[in-house]
Image: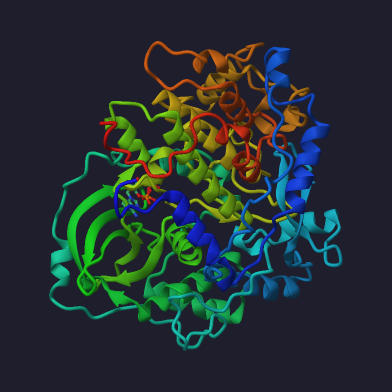
Amino acid sequence: MAAGRKSVSLRRESYRSSSTKVFNYHNDGPLRDEVVGSRHSHDARSGFHGGKEEREQGEICVERPSGLPPPEKKRKFSPIIWDLAEEVARKSSRSGVSQVPPVSPLHPTVLRSPGAGGVVRAPSLNSTTALPQEQSQKYYRDVDVEEENDVQGWNITKSRWASDGLSPSGAGDEHKRCRVSSSPETGEFRRECSESTVTRSSGSSGRDYNLCSSAEDTDDDENEFLIESKDVEEQSNVSDSSSDSDEIGVSTYAQRNINMLQSCRSVCEFEMIKKINEGTYGVVYKARDKKTGEIVALKKVKMLDREGFPMSSLREMNILLSFNHPSIVDVKEVVVDDYDGTFMVMEHMEYDLKGLMEVKKKPFSISEIKSLMQQLLEGVKYLHGNWVLHRDLKTSNILLNSEGELKICDFGLSRQYGSPLKPYTPVVVTLWYRAPELLLGAKEYSTAIDMWSVGCIMAELIAKEPLFKGKSELEQLNKIFQTLGTPDEKIWPGLSKLPGSKAKFVKQPYNMLRKKFPATSFTGSPVLSELGFDLLKKLLTYDPAERITAEEALCHDWFQEGSLPKSDFNPIFPSW
Ligand SMILES: Nc1ncnc2c1ncn2[C@@H]1O[C@H](COP(=O)(O)OP(=O)(O)OP(=O)(O)O)[C@@H](O)[C@H]1O
């Protein structure tokens, strides 16, 4: 290890050892056992086509290896976004509809959803407060508010960037638009800048698929909200007299959080170095904190033409400010400029995985891939353990630094999940990484969608190109079926109930995945052992209820076999 370089494993150990200091709830243990139990009982339908040998390969690990560290710490803060629960509570008590009760994070269980979307590997409802199913379905029909509402357990009053004087429930002083005076230096931050590093993916197109291709988006409440002061005023007035409209309730909530920006520092306190990249929702800059000299990444929220401050950015800020994990990009604070621009101050990472793979001549070695996969799975496990689905895992949303540390970024599409399952939009996750249940229109889905994306990323790390590169949803499904075999009700119970399952798909009786990842290679690409292939096929299992979880994947034997995960590699040198 180079002198002074932090080893990934050391970094993780120190992270874990500090875990007890922070607000902590966890759902380790029973969850895992039950998932494993269910998996064993469903062994016959591995969700995987192919020969008998394939089906019999590698049982997933059942026991947590002895000596594994204790459960990790969870959020650094609880996100303020979930304050909205209060509004829903008020609203539904008025409409006489029962509330979905608090979700207890302490009673994990595995629930099979009524639809075919899969299993909620989530903490269960506390049995004393759980609603009968018909009642919770009525809740969905009558109270189709912002998705965040469904979990009432987090009753958060403020986040790191909420000033003390602002109570989330107090509405009195929340109508004013945030404006922070700044020094003339602000100008330097607004100058045009187009320089971009070679190791960045060139923008991102994926979200486009997500946001415009379905009219059903609405039930996911992916609405963006206008936060202009005039409208805020109007909306507040309306909401004072009647908060029966979901939109009003959510907007009031949004304005409250935006107004918390009043206590933020100005972006003038940073010196812009260069523009790094631009996505759908933000422009990312490399900058230096003038006070400390620290190099950071500033993500400027792109205001939407008509709607103003995007709800997705608000979600992202809330989630990232509340999270604390070595595999999740750290957001330090939010700063603002004179023109109502809002920036997230993040730790700076040198590369994103997509850009890096585009320019990297040599493929990653197996031990490097193991390290990346391990870090990615740690991050996903943390998210899922904290009730968050990322919903947009892809290589351009995975950041790396020169020490080989990996961090997940871009939480604009992420959302909390809970049980019982609520219908969400199936139009999430960039097409190439989108799980088959989403492509087939499942509205009840859970953590398994992220695991499919992790499988696609693992395959891409090995092959150095995306596994399924469809141009439309149908083509994407056909590409998946051509490689993994066309699924049927036997290997994926509930498949026929999915809205898209009646379409005419290619008929492919065999699983051809191993052909794509042969055990020997003459091309110099890394060779995937039987165990590695076993993990890959468990990630790419059709039936979401059978798909491996992040926690299970982390103790897969592949990580212990042969070349171990490399904890201190430089992704650029000497591979370049
Ligand atoms: N902390 C960071 N350090 C360095 N670069 C970053 C950082 N965060 C993001 N980037 C770069 O900026 C790009 C866009 O960031 P991000 O995905 O968060 O924006 P977005 O607008 O939400 O994108 P999308 O179009 O995928 O929704 C990333 O792919 C990465 O190249």
Q: Quadrant of residue 461?
A: top left
Classify 187 as above or below 264: above
In the rendered view of the protein, which quadrant contains the C terminus?
top left
Question: Which residue is at 79% across, 71% downward?
Answer: 96
Q: Quadrant of residue 383?
A: bottom right
In the rendered view of the protein, which quadrant contains the N terminus?
top left
291 relative position to 75: left or right: left
Question: Which residue is at 40% across, 63% downward?
Answer: 331
Question: Which residue is at 83% across, 61% downward?
Answer: 131
Q: Position of residue 61 (x, y in %)?
A: 70, 37
Q: Position of residue 563 (x, y in %)?
A: 48, 31
Q: Position of residue 562 (x, y in %)?
A: 52, 29
183 relative position to 399: left or right: left
Classify 268 as above or below 405: below
Question: Which residue is at 68% across, 21% downward?
Answer: 487
Classify 362 as above or below 454: above
Residue nearer the viewer, 171 or 189? 189
Residue nearer the viewer, 508 or 5? 5
The total number of labels drawn is: 0
Q: Position of residue 79 (x, y in %)?
A: 54, 68
